[in-house]
Amino acid sequence: MGRFENVADLAAIAPESVALDLACGQGRTTRALLAAGPRLVHAVDVGAALDDDLLLDPRVRAHIAELDTLPLADGSVDAAVSLNAVEHLADVGAHLHEVHRVLRPGGTAVLAHSDWDTALFTSDDDALTRELLDRFVAHVPARGASTDGFAGRKLLRHAAASPFTVESVHSWADPHRRFDEGSVAWKVATGILAAAGDEPGLAARAAGWVEGLRRAARTGTFLFAVTDVAVVLRK
């Protein structure tokens, strides 16, 4: 199973229940939640990115909303998943309080995040890989976007400050062998290129590094992995 299926499994979706996918993006977690047979999945994000077929699915209700002001009634949700949202939130506590509000008593929330500092790339230059990854983790994107390359390892701290009870903690690192456009490894590598872009010498080395990743992918020797952390919370 991949990260989306893992978090959906931890949410323990019951048939005919109501689930909540926070920071749903295109809907990969929504699809994993639907596979468990809920009556309804609320898919919430700050922008419109959900795939068209999910928008047309009668089991899915899409919402464009901030993650700390959810357009849902108190106690209206049985289980919730917040995957890779924490690093983008100005106030994680407000987010968790909102999730707690909309969950029914006894409901489950899964707070999960990739810890980007743990990313592993097959490369011919380990020292350069480490330098580029450090640059990526420390990089602050333009337009005021928020990032945190250490978000996964901080989840327990956020959970401890929330009204939830921590039930369990999990981690995994799925192997990825693809390095084509749209793959997880490709997305992280493009982020690394962006982080190196303001230093011409490093940017040129980073471009050569990416070409090395492409060569490894063509020969079947490419590998990417990153540690995901998930905390299961109970209301």
Image: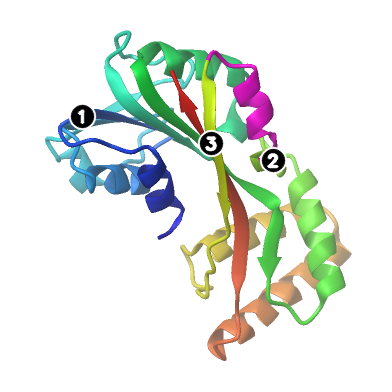
Residue 155 shown in magenta: yes
Callout 3 crowding tier (Cα within 10 Å): few <14, some 14–19, many ≥20: few
Label ID, residue 168: 3
Q: In the rendered view of the protein, which quadrant contains the N terminus?
A: bottom left
**Label 3 close to label 1 by CB (< 8 Å):** no
Residue at 48 percent across and 67 percent down: it is: 181
| Residue underneath mark 2 | 153
Across and down, in percent, residue 48 comes to: 35, 34
* Front position among marks 3 and 1: 3
| Residue underneath mark 1 | 17
C-alpha separation, residue under disc 3 versus residue under disc 1:
22 Å
Q: Amino acid at mark 2?
A: Arg
Task: Classify 159 as above or below 21.
Answer: above
Left or right placement of residue 129 versus residue 43 in this view:
right
Q: Nearer the viewer, residue 209 or 70?
A: 70
Q: Write the start and end of the magenta stretch as one range.
A: 153-163
**Label 1 close to label 2 by CB (< 8 Å):** no
- Count up the numbered dots: 3
Task: Classify 230 as above or below 46.
Answer: below
Across and down, in percent, residue 202 comes to: 85, 64
Q: Amino acid at mark 3?
A: Ser
Callout 2 crowding tier (Cα within 10 Å): few <14, some 14–19, many ≥20: some
Left or right placement of residue 115 versus residue 204 in this view:
left
SS type, badge 2: helix
Most extreme residue toward the bottom, as rendered?
219
Residue at 52 percent across and 69 percent down: it is: 176
SS type, badge 1: loop
Callout 1 crowding tier (Cα within 10 Å): few <14, some 14–19, many ≥20: some
